[in-house]
């Protein structure tokens, strides 16, 4: 247990220095309190009290889910989001992404990112970074909570720094909803992810 706690603490330090996004929310990504008419850019400060069902096993997006029992607030705070859905209509709204669309019934999608996204260390959060994250979640040996959704992707192709082509194993025109609900929505620094201890040591 002590070793596991030390590994989690060490990984948290890596994430704090290399993964947190700088100004990556983009236009329209802020939220407004219910009943409020005020809008504007997010500001630092304030207090948020959150009930969690337990301590996270890891800060790796592979171990987090955007569901109440898998630290969604932690994942969203650390990584931001590519997209969200309206809780009333379930319509997809974009944050770090600008578009995720299909013209062939969900057989292929084109993900378009906002230009100029960076991690706090200045490295780009671009289409190649999303490809690295999504391809990683497809690896069955990783044991990701998002493997079910990630494995629905047959392959990804970087078209340019802000554009990623996604080919599905089976057409799914509603795949954006799967991205919102799992680790596919959280993009971490490849450099930081490559420092994550093997799964066999993280669980000891």
Image: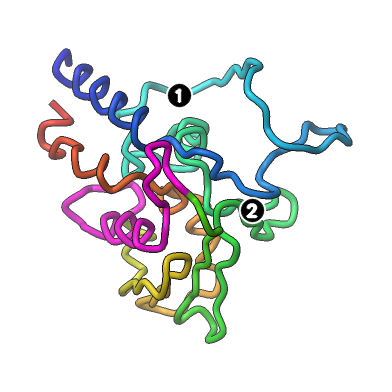
The quarter of the image holding the N terminus is top left
Mark 1 crowd level (few <14, some 14–19, many ≥20, 10 Å Cα) = few
| Mark 2 secondary-structure assignment | strand
Q: Is residue 130 magenta?
A: yes
Examine the rendered structure and indicate whether residue 53 appears above or below residue 146.
above
Horizontally, residue 101 falls left or right of residue 134, namely right
Q: CA distance from mark 1 to mark 2?
A: 23 Å
List x then y, in percent, for residue 174: 55, 69
Q: Residue at x 31, y 38 (%)?
A: 60
Horizontally, residue 112 falls left or right of residue 159, namely right
- The answer to which image quadrant residue 158 occupies is bottom left
Examine the rendered structure and indicate whether residue 91 appears above or below residue 196.
below
Closer to the observer: label 1 or label 2? 2
Examine the rendered structure and indicate whether residue 42 appears above or below residue 83.
above
List x then y, in percent, for residue 79: 46, 40
Q: Which residue is mark 2?
A: 85
Relative depth, front residue between 77 and 116: 116
The quarter of the image holding the C terminus is top left
Relative depth, front residue between 106 and 132: 132
Q: Which residues are magenta?
A: 118-146
Q: Residue at x 42, y 42 (%)?
A: 119
List x then y, in percent, for residue 55: 37, 22
Q: Residue furthest top?
A: 2
Q: Residue at x 57, y 54 (%)?
A: 83
Q: Is residue 132 magenta?
A: yes
| Mark 1 secondary-structure assignment | loop
Examine the rendered structure and indicate whether residue 50 appears above or below residue 181.
above
Residue 53's tag is 1
Pointers 1 and 2 in contact (C-beta within 8 Å): no
Q: Earlier in the sequence, mark 1 or mark 2?
A: 1
Q: Residue at x 14, y 18 (%)?
A: 3
Mark 2 crowd level (few <14, some 14–19, many ≥20, 10 Å Cα) = some
């Amino acid at each position: 247990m002590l070793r596991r706690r030390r590994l989690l603490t060490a990984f948290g330090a890596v994430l704090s220095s290399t993964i947190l996004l700088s100004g990556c929310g983009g236009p329209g990504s802020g939220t407004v309190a219910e009943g409020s008419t005020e809008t504007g850019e997010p500001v630092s400060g304030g207090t948020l009290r959150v009930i969690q069902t337990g301590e996270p096993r890891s800060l790796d997006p592979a171990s987090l889910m955007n569901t109440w029992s898998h630290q969604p607030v932690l994942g969203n705070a650390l990584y931001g989001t590519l997209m969200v859905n309206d809780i009333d209509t379930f319509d997809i709204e974009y944050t770090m992404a600008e578009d995720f669309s299909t013209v062939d019934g969900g057989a292929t999608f084109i993900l378009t990112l906002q230009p100029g996204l960076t991690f706090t260390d200045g490295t780009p959060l671009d289409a190649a970074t999303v490809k690295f994250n999504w391809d990683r979640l497809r690896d069955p040996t990783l044991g990701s909570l998002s493997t079910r959704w990630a494995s629905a992707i047959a392959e990804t192709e970087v078209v340019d720094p802000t554009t990623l082509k996604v080919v599905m194993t089976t057409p799914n025109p509603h795949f954006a909803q799967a991205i919102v609900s799992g680790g596919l929505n959280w993009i971490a620094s490849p450099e930081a992810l490559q420092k994550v201890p093997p799964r066999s040591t993280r669980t000891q």
